[in-house]
Image (tube, helix red, strand yellow):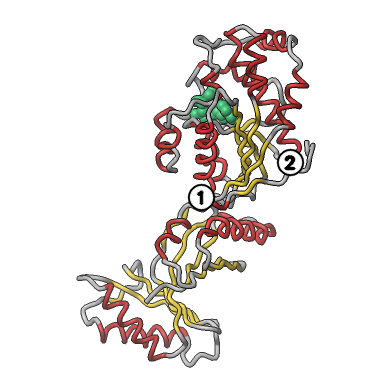
Amino acid sequence: MQYSEIMVRHGELSTKGKNRMRFINKLKHNIEDVLSVFPEVKVSSDRDRTHVYLNGTDYEPVADALKKIFGIQGFSPVYKLEKDMNLIKSFVQTLMTDLYREGLTFKISSKRSDHHFELDSRELNHVLGDAVFEAVPNIKAQMKHPDINLKVEIRDEAVYISYEDIKGAGGLPVGTSGKGMLMISGGIDSPVAGYLSLKRGVDIEAVHFASPPYTSPGALKKAQDLTRKLTKFGGNIQFIEVPFTEIQEEIKAKAPEAYLMTLTRRFMMRITDRIREVRQGLVIINGESLGQVASQTLESMVAINAVTATPIVRPVVTMDKLEIIDLAQKIDTFDISIQPFEDCCTVFAPDRPKTNPKLHNAENYEKRMDVEGLIERAVNGIKITIITPHEEKDEIEHLINNLL
Ligand code: ATP
Ligand code: MG
């Protein structure tokens, strides 16, 4: 027999008092986004549980998708039966016969919300327990930590039977902690930074700087594919492509080699901040990791960060490269990140970037440029795509002219 639904237990959100329904609704919406690739699946939520109705869809791929969604503590696949005692008995017998192996222990935990049902929960435990012994004489009953805890729930409309508890991803439902702008390159670190923010419920919009023709369509696609991997944890993500060619050419023309990196990062930060403001994000998230490359010294951080007072969240800042790679492999972004498409920073990277840039120098070089005009043109040229778990469903967002 096939599972009819999956019963989802909510995570940490049970502690959130009167915000509870808001959390649950977000989670429901995220589950719908992620499971949108299964057209027959329907989702409904109440205060205690979210129900994922399979309507004939295979259980395994849906379960694999659910395991990744933040805000889910655990879930159980459920069989649905008619409320007929003979049927329930023989179903339980067949199930336990299938599951039996030497030494197996079990218990029956019945619950009855339909109080008109012929047996109460104690009687149900008894009758069904006896039925199991009849079918599998060698099985042992055990009340504490049995191998199989068979849950039988008599509701108004039907009987629901489950015995597996599968662990969920934990974390908070994406979107319950407000919005942040993730600066996503094609590298290893920024997708991991995105993943870690999603884990704590941050709704991210991905901002990517592209410098065609110096950067290829492949580099852009790579950043989008990385973003798509992140949709598995909480649903669709807006991907914002920023035209960055003019700015990079201008920096290259007007500033000394040693400061290219610092200035590039300062522009990226300012533009991301401008987009954040319009789109009502609260913070900026990036993949900086201390000491990894020249641009990631504390001195660099000071010189780059000086362009904004917006909080910058750096989830991987203290992680070793190998720790980041471990996570990248776990979330399946690593293989995409190591594809050989150069992003805008690599193309314009100086051989010897300054490891201790001075803020006043950076500011002085910028006086040679029309900083405001450059930023405005970049921001007015952004393109937004809604990235979904399945590429065919991506949508270009309709932009109102001069939205920014
Ligand atoms: P990553 O592996 O994330 O590319 P990295 O180790 O290569 O990081 P840098 O190149 O110094 O580090 O970039 C630092 C951070 O700046 C990145 O983690 C990312 O958040 C942001 N960033 C770099 N390039 C881009 C880009 N083209 N578009 C958007 N953000 C970028
Ligand atoms: Mg990089």
Q: Residue at the far front: name it.
A: 213
**Helix, strand or loop at disc 2?**
loop
Q: Residue at the far right: name it.
A: 402
| Residue at 74% across, 13% down | 369
Residue 264 shows in the view:
yes
Residue 317 shows in the view:
no
Q: Quadrant of the N terminus?
A: bottom left
Q: Amino acid at mark 2?
A: Gln
Location of residue 330 in the rendering, given as x and y in whole percent from the top left corner:
41, 42
Report the side of 1 relative to 244 (left or right).
left
Which quadrant would residue 3 be assigned to in this image?
bottom left
Residue at the spot of label 1: 232
Q: Amino acid at mark 1?
A: Lys
Q: Quadrant of ligand 1?
A: top right
Location of residue 145 in the rendering, given as x and y in whole percent from the top left corner:
35, 66
Report the side of 360 relative to 123 (left or right).
right
Residue at the spot of label 2: 280
Give residue 347's mark: none
152 and 261: which is toward the camera? 261
Location of residue 269 in the rendering, given as x and y in whole percent from the top left corner:
66, 26
Count of residue discs: 2
- Tag 1 or tag 2, which sits nearer the N-term? 1
> Is the C-beta separation of discs 2 and 1 under 8 Å?
no
Location of residue 273 in the rendering, given as x and y in whole percent from the top left corner:
70, 31
Q: CA distance from mark 2 to mark 1?
A: 23 Å
| 169 vs 259: above or below | below
Which quadrant would residue 98 be assigned to in this image?
bottom left
**Helix, strand or loop at disc 1?**
helix
| 199 vs 283: above or below | below
